Image (cartoon, helix red, strand yellow):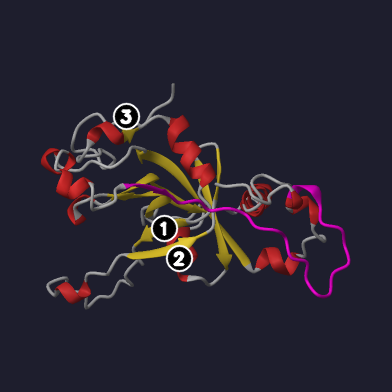
């Protein structure tokens, strides 16, 4: 089984706390990536070089940026898209293919989290959540090949519909739309997944104290992201396609 198993505790994807919840295999990582509809992408905007750069003032150190993005995965590559001048897409595009620039490929961290339940306990300090999360690290690149660009865009569109082929059920894409859209690929170098799916974990003395357990409720409140009934637009007369109609009541 393919894995991102860290070789040491110093590896960036090594889960240091509550290690029994960590998973490093491709299957678990990909399951969470495929279920999640929104990613948070961490990156640093490259600083413009200047002959007057000193690097002595910490105000010159750029803040990291984290932006929510829709995305999709093809094998072990993540695809993002946006307007051609978007800050995130420009920062992660890196030097053009074939460029003589010595600038390294930009690095990115992509996280996806899904909340599955609220864990209610008798102590406020033990309240927690059931969840699925994944953290991916990799170098980003601008997608310049036309076929890969369309493939990435189609995957992102279809992901919204849980794999329903919406890309094929659209009017023909126009050249100006493709030209004004930038697609960036992040080839996952390493990743880790963390999952929690258990009940409350109150302190032992609280669990056996009748004055507490008879007075204060504890348990699990499930949390679900569920698709609702499709609502047609005012101007449209088309029949709702099956791949949309069947989304109703489905959960991620």
Point out the stretch of residues depicted in magenta: 219-243
Kindly state the secondary structure of the residue where label 3 is placed.
loop
Q: Which residue is drawn at 20% across and 43% down?
A: 202
Kindly state the secondary structure of the residue where label 1 is placed.
strand
Quarter occupied by residue 200: top left
Q: Please name the residue that numbered disc 2 is placed on.
A: 88
Say whether residue 94 is visible. Answer: no
Camera-side residue of 53 and 22: 22
Image height check: is 182 above or below 113?
A: below
Q: Position of residue 140 (x, y in %)?
A: 44, 52
Q: Residue 5 carries which label?
A: 3
Cα distance, mark 1 to mark 3? Answer: 22 Å
Q: Which residue is drawn at 19% across and 52% down?
A: 123
Mark positioned earlier in the residue sequence (3 or 2): 3
Q: Residue at x 11, y 40 (%)?
A: 205
Q: How crowded is mark 2: few (under 14 residues within 10 Å), some or many (20 or more)?
A: many
Q: Is residue 27 magenta?
A: no
Q: How crowded is mark 1: few (under 14 residues within 10 Å), some or many (20 or more)?
A: many
Mark positioned earlier in the residue sequence (2 or 1): 1
Q: Please name the residue that numbered disc 1 is placed on.
A: 41
Q: Where is residue 34 in the image (x, y as percent from the top left)?
A: 53, 43
In the image, which is nearer the foreground, mark 3 or mark 2?
A: 3
Q: Residue 13 carries which label?
A: none
Mark 1 touching mark 3, by CB under 8 A? Answer: no
Mark 2 touching mark 1, by CB under 8 A? Answer: yes
Image height check: is 40 above or below 83?
A: above
Q: Quadrant of the N terminus?
A: top left
């Amino acid at each position: 089984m393919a894995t991102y198993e860290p070789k040491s505790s110093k590896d960036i994807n090594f889960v240091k706390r509550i290690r029994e919840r960590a998973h490093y295999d491709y299957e678990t990582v990909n399951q969470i990536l495929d279920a999640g509809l929104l990613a948070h992408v961490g990156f640093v905007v490259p600083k413009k070089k200047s002959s007057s750069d000193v690097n002595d003032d910490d105000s010159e150190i750029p803040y990291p940026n984290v932006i929510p993005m829709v995305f999709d995965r093809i094998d072990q590559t993540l695809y993002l898209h946006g307007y051609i001048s978007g800050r995130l897409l420009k920062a992660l595009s890196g030097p053009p293919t074939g460029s003589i620039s010595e600038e390294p490929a930009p690095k990115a961290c992509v996280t996806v989290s899904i909340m599955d339940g609220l864990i209610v306990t008798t102590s406020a300090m033990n309240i927690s959540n059931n969840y699925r999360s994944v953290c991916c690290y990799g170098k980003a690149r601008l997608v310049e090949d036309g076929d890969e660009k369309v493939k990435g865009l189609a995957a992102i569109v279809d992901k919204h519909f849980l794999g329903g082929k919406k890309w094929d059920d659209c009017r023909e894409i126009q050249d100006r739309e493709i030209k004004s859209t930038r697609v960036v690929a992040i080839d996952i170098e390493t990743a880790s997944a963390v999952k929690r799916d258990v009940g409350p974990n109150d302190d032992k003395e609280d669990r056996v104290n009748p004055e507490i357990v008879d007075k204060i409720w504890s348990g699990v409140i499930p949390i679900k992201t569920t698709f609702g009934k499709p609502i047609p637009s005012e101007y449209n007369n088309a029949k709702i396609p099956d791949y949309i109609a069947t989304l109703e009541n489905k959960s991620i």
